[in-house]
Image (spheres, grey):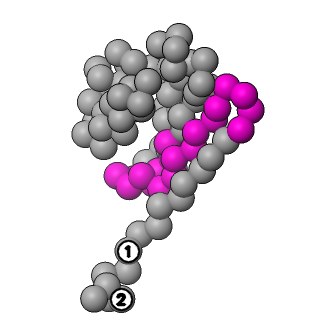
Amino acid sequence: ELSTLVEAMRGTLTGDAVALQKHFITAVAGNAQGWKLTLVPRDRALAAQVREVVIEGQRGDMRAVSLGLAGGDSSRMTIEPIDSAKTP
């Protein structure tokens, strides 16, 4: 099941819609200023553990990844841009 989640991230980062749709039912909402990609697993074994993966972004940048588990728990990772002026 973990390999399917890895495929979701890889497909999102590379823009590979075919790979995403192979493993997930996909839904896209929003516009370039703020978008959301919802992925629902097609695989029964994964769906028994993961209800959905929601990836949010602005323009070409991924800004958050939320994981909703089948039991009701959830996890959210936010991604902030790096200020290159403060990077060593």
Residue ID at (56%, 18%): 47
Is 38 in front, or is 58?
38
Disc 1 packing (10 Å; few <14; some 14–19; many ≥20):
few
**Quarter of the image containing the C terminus?**
bottom left
What are the residue bounds of the magenta stretch? Answer: 55-73
Q: Is residue 64 magenta?
A: yes
Q: State the residue in front, 72 or 40.
A: 72
Task: Say if mark 2 contacts mark 1, CB within 8 Å.
Answer: yes
Image coords of residue 49 (percent x, y): 59, 24
Asked whether residue 32 is drawn in magenta, I would say: no
Q: Secondary structure at mark 1?
A: loop
Q: Answer whether residue 44 is visible to the viewer in this image.
A: yes
Q: Position of residue 73 (x, y in %)?
A: 71, 38
- Per the picture, the main secondary structure of the magenta-coloured stretch is strand
Secondary element at image label 2: loop
- Quarter of the image containing the N terminus? top left
Task: Name the residue type under label 1.
Answer: Ile
Image position of 82 with respect to 16: above or below: below
The circle on residue 82 is 1
**Residue 85 lies in what quarter of the image?**
bottom left
